[in-house]
Image: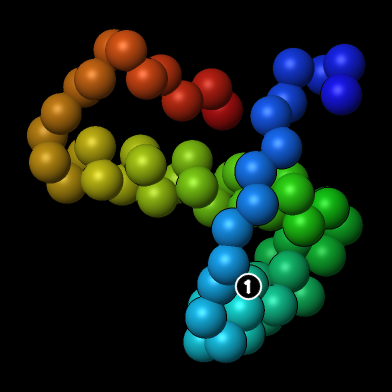
Amino acid sequence: MGTGLKKLTFAVTPDIEAVLDKEKKERFYDRSRSDMIRELIKAGLRGVKKENGTADGNHEINT
């Protein structure tokens, strides 16, 4: 993987799988599942940082 990406593997519940499948069909139909997961993780991390009012400079999220 010469792109600087790190491969991760994780398990999801059937409920989360259904939500991810729906998002893939509705919003991320033209992107890979990996791109979708990266975008959803980044959005979630931005939301948590905003909710907590934190600005952790050690873990910048590139958008």
The furthest residue to the top: 57
Percent of width and height locating residue 10: 59, 58
Name the residue at 24% across, 20% down: 56
Can residue 19 be seen from the camera position used here? Answer: no
Percent of width and height locating residue 42: 49, 40
Give the total number of marks visible in the rendering: 1
Q: Judge by depth and name the residue closer to the eye, 62 or 27.
A: 62
Q: Judge by depth and name the residue closer to the eye, 55 or 16.
A: 16
Percent of width and height locating residue 6: 69, 29
Compared with 61, 53 (above or below) is: below
Q: Judge by depth and name the residue closer to the eye, 7 or 54.
A: 7
Q: Which image quarter is the C terminus in?
A: top right
Is 44 positioned to the left or the right of 24 in the image?
left
Q: Check disc 1 and report the residue beneath it.
A: 20
Name the residue at 46% across, 25% down: 61
Name the residue at 52% across, 87% down: 15
Amino acid under label 1? Answer: Leu
Name the residue at 67% across, 80% down: 22
Is 38 positioned to the left or the right of 24 in the image?
left
Percent of width and height locating residue 29: 83, 65
Q: Which image quarter is the N terminus in?
A: top right
Q: Residues within 10 Å of mark 1 (few under 14, many from 20)?
A: some
Q: Quadrant of residue 14?
A: bottom right
Query: Which type of secondary structure does the marked residue at label 1 adopt?
Result: helix
Can residue 50 be seen from the camera position used here? Answer: yes
Q: Judge by depth and name the residue closer to the eye, 11 or 53.
A: 11
Its colouring scheme is rainbow
